[in-house]
Amino acid sequence: MKTFIPKIDPNNRKWWVVDLDGVVLGRAAVKVATILRGKDKPIFTPHLDTGDHVVVINARNVRLSGKNKPTRLKYYRYSGYPGGLKETTFERMMQKKPDDLFRLVVRRMLPKNRLGRKMLKKLHVYAGAEHPHKAQKPEMLKL
């Protein structure tokens, strides 16, 4: 029996819209990462990009599932130089760039190689309710 290798046509990828208004951050990120990878499809193959495009709106209205998490949760980045470790809280990142925060959370759930970087290009995150992808006729995804 031969191994089935799906033929991937980039023109036939679906487009999804996810509204994050009042949704828990981690649960939404897991669902979006699953769609980007293509694990929700029967033709999923680990070494191929079989996922769909995801448009995320209202990223500034996402919430956390804890009372004191917004002040306690910290994100770190390191420049590579001595003393170059920087930290910021969830609240501060939500004030500055809420779309980058959601993209960071989803990026950490994808493979850490060139396949994961290719999948991340199909994620389009917007802080507000407007997005420029209406021509692709995206379907609403219920979380």
Image (cartoon, helix red, strand yellow):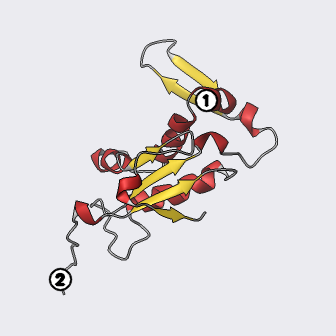
- State left or right for residue 71 relative to residue 49: right
Q: In the picture, residue 44 is in which quadrant?
A: bottom left
Mark seen at residue 93: 1
Q: Residue furthest front?
A: 135
Front one among 44 and 24: 24
Label 2 – label 1 distance at C-alpha: 49 Å
Q: Secondary structure at mark 2?
A: loop
Q: Is residue 22 above or below residue 13?
A: above
Q: Is residue 23 above or below residue 143?
A: above
Q: Position of residue 136 (x, y in %)?
A: 35, 57
Q: Residue furthest left?
A: 2
- State left or right for residue 52 relative to residue 100: left
Q: Quadrant of the C terminus?
A: bottom right
Q: Position of residue 56 (x, y in %)?
A: 51, 49
Residue at the (21%, 65%) spot, across then down: 9
Q: Position of residue 126 (x, y in %)?
A: 51, 41
Which kind of residue does numbered mark 2 sit on?
Lys
Q: Determine which residue is flagged by label 2.
A: 2
Mark seen at residue 107: none
First of labels 2, 1 by sequence position: 2
Front one among 64 and 73: 64
Residue count near mark 1 (Cα–Cα under 10 Å), binned few <14, some 14–19, many ≥20:
some
Q: Position of residue 115 (x, y in %)?
A: 29, 50
Residue at the (59%, 45%) spot, across then down: 58
Q: Secondary structure at mark 1?
A: helix
Front one among 8 and 17: 17
Residue count near mark 2 (Cα–Cα under 10 Å), binned few <14, some 14–19, many ≥20:
few
Front one among 140 and 119: 140
Residue at the (64%, 28%) spot, across then down: 95
Q: Is residue 65 above or below residue 13?
A: above
